[in-house]
Image (cartoon, rainbow, N blue to C red):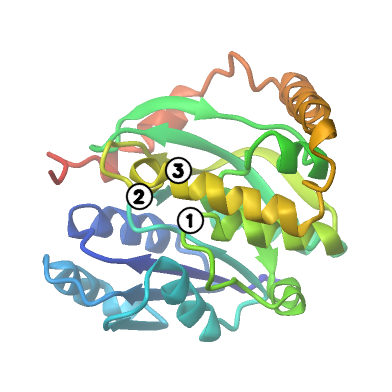
Amino acid sequence: MTISISIVTCSYQQGAYLDATLRSVLDQRYPGLEYIVIDGGSTDGSVAVIERHQQSLAHWVSERDHGQTDALIKGFAHARGEVQGWLCSDDLLLPGALHRVGAFFATHPGVQAVYGDSLWIDANGHFLRPKKEGAFFRHAFLFDHNFIPQPSMFWRRSLYEQVGGLDPRFNLAMDSDLWERFSRHTRIAHIPQYLSCMRFYPQQKTRSLRPQGRLEDEEIRSRCRLAAWPGLQPLNRLTGTALRVGAKLVAGGYGAVVDESVVAALKPYHLASAAE
């Protein structure tokens, strides 16, 4: 049985990267794919890019919104797949990723959420380095950092609905917030396979707004009542980091070598030049 998977991509003024992102999803040729694209009213040619692929999309719209989280919420409101995930408009899915995810959920009916590993790529889509993680520990997630590569994270729609979906109050840490609420209800699994690529370049949102992201992360910790004892914070950070490092060591995350065939699979998505 094929597990249906809904992928949401939200975009604003990302026309330079958007075609590669869309193709990386549609080239999966996954039979149970429902692909939804929410554009925030771009004026940089993004709409023309989307229109080239519209026959393969379940739903798309280009209209003003209140930012990335609002766009994602709108997208997931249309999603009907049993499994969900989102892909930012400058990231990529690696070939075969959805087949691996679908097969995992089909053979692990008790698992509600799972993440894989990812590759860092530069603005033009060339391989930089791997991001290979280990098993999930809630304590490490909260006190070290959000080490889950967002485009490699997938979950059952029933879990998303159970926790109330994305919180529109978060502009940068919306993924951390969602993963934290997931972890209250279920064990988050990890599969040691590269599923996605995350683009790394100076203009990206998470780099330019990093201080705001840290504030949102602290709000998540406070909400979990983990900031009530300031004297324990150094110990919490130490043990959280130790858990993450230990899990990554066991998984072979340090010094990981990526097979040449995986790197070669990026070539169809290389850009001649990146947007300024």
Q: Residues within 10 Å of mark 1 (few under 14, many from 20)?
A: many
Ranked by sequence position, the earlier of labels 3 and 1 is 1
Ranked by sequence position, the earlier of labels 2 and 3 is 2
Residue 138 sits in which quadrant? top right
- Residue at 74% x, 59% y is 223
Q: Which mark is residue 97?
A: none
Q: Residue 50 at x, y = what percent?
A: 24, 72
Q: As rendered, which of 8 and 172 lies closer to the eye? A: 172
What kind of residue is marked 2? Lys
Residue that mark 1 sits on: 172
Q: Which mark is residue 205?
A: 2
Q: CA distance from mark 2 to mark 3?
A: 11 Å
The quarter in which the C terminus is drawn is: top left
Could you tell whether 46 is left or right of 64 in the image?
A: left
What kind of residue is marked 3? Pro
Residue that mark 3 sits on: 211
What kind of residue is marked 1? Leu
Q: Residue 156 at x, y = what percent?
A: 71, 69
Q: Residue 98 at x, y = what percent?
A: 56, 57
Could you tell whether 184 is left or right of 222 in the image?
A: right
Q: CA distance from mark 2 to mark 1?
A: 8 Å
Q: Residues within 10 Å of mark 2 (few under 14, many from 20)?
A: few
Ranked by sequence position, the earlier of labels 2 and 1 is 1
Could you tell whether 229 is left or right of 158 in the image?
A: right
- Residue at 23% x, 37% y is 124
Q: Nearer the viewer, mark 2 or mark 3?
A: 3
**Relative to residue 196, is residue 110 depicted above or below?**
below
Q: CA distance from mark 3 to mark 1?
A: 10 Å
